[in-house]
Image (cartoon, rainbow, N blue to C red):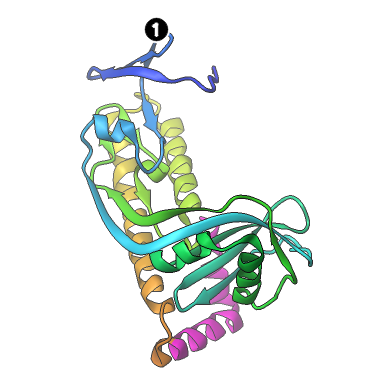
Amino acid sequence: ATLMFDTEYQQIHQSESDVFITLKSGEPIIAKLLVAADGANSAIRKQFNMALSFKDYDHHALVATVKTKEPHANTARQVFLPTGPLAFLPLSDANTHSIVWSTSPNHCDELLAMDDTTFNKAVMAAIDGQCGLCEVQSKRAAFPLKMRYAQQWVSGKVVLMGDAAHTIHPLAGLGMNLGLKDAAYLIELLTSDSKEFASTRTLRDYERTRKLDAQKHIAMMQGLKELFEGANPVKKLIRGVGLSLVDNLGLIKHLFAKEAIGK
């Protein structure tokens, strides 16, 4: 196998059995399969006219690196606020987190406009001081959240994977796991196909199976988003009872954990 980093392609063409790639350097590559894992705005998906469905979540995600007084103990934390969830994700340094704050576009603009001191106070208040004083360590960035779902995942010997095939709301942190499950299932199929590498049947099996899983997660994220946003007292009661049941019923909790880690 040959790994090539920081290498751009110039052209992609395919025949019935091969994919022909010309790199920017002019070097030609012939392959039996091209896996397009080039992100939510996949240029390869667009080139091969693979149709896309999408929905605006009406949320923006603000991301930043934050240092806290208390160590994270390798624990991810998430709070559900009326405007959307705030996640604290542990990094390698014991007191440093990557935060993802999903909120309304107007609130996101307010957070971006704050000076560092005001923003630090807002973050600490939002997470109810669980990690002590907060100090932002990076520039803040924000981007709109959209559900994307490719209606077609296979075009000849070109297949979509990860964000190129699907993006979901980050409130449960399952987007990356979905992409890893795409990769794992495709590898399983390719290694078990002894007659022909990347046969049409194999690629259609990949498309059919992974599309069903993506559809399930898209529907689940939409339901969770609607359940956890706002301050409706009925929603709050359902959330509280539901989470308490999950926390206290070991079997259900185990099933949720397995789903979250992609098993």
> Magenta residues?
236-263
The residue closer to the viewer here, 178 or 95, is: 95
Q: Position of residue 83 (x, y in %)?
A: 44, 74
Q: Residues within 10 Å of mark 1 (few under 14, many from 20)?
A: few
- Name which residue type carries label 1: Gly
Q: Quadrant of residue 71?
A: bottom right
Residue found 33% across the figure and 65% down from its top: 219
Q: Is residue 183 visible?
A: yes
Name the residue rendered at 41%, 77% in the picture.
229
Name the residue nearer the viewer: 28 or 142: 142
Q: Is residue 185 left or right of residue 16?
A: right
Q: Which residue is mark 1?
A: 26
Q: Secondary structure at mark 1?
A: loop
Q: In the picture shown, does residue 153 fall above or below 58?
A: above
Q: Could you say which quadrant of the image residue 212 lies in?
A: bottom left
x and y, in percent, of residue 35 in the image: 39, 31
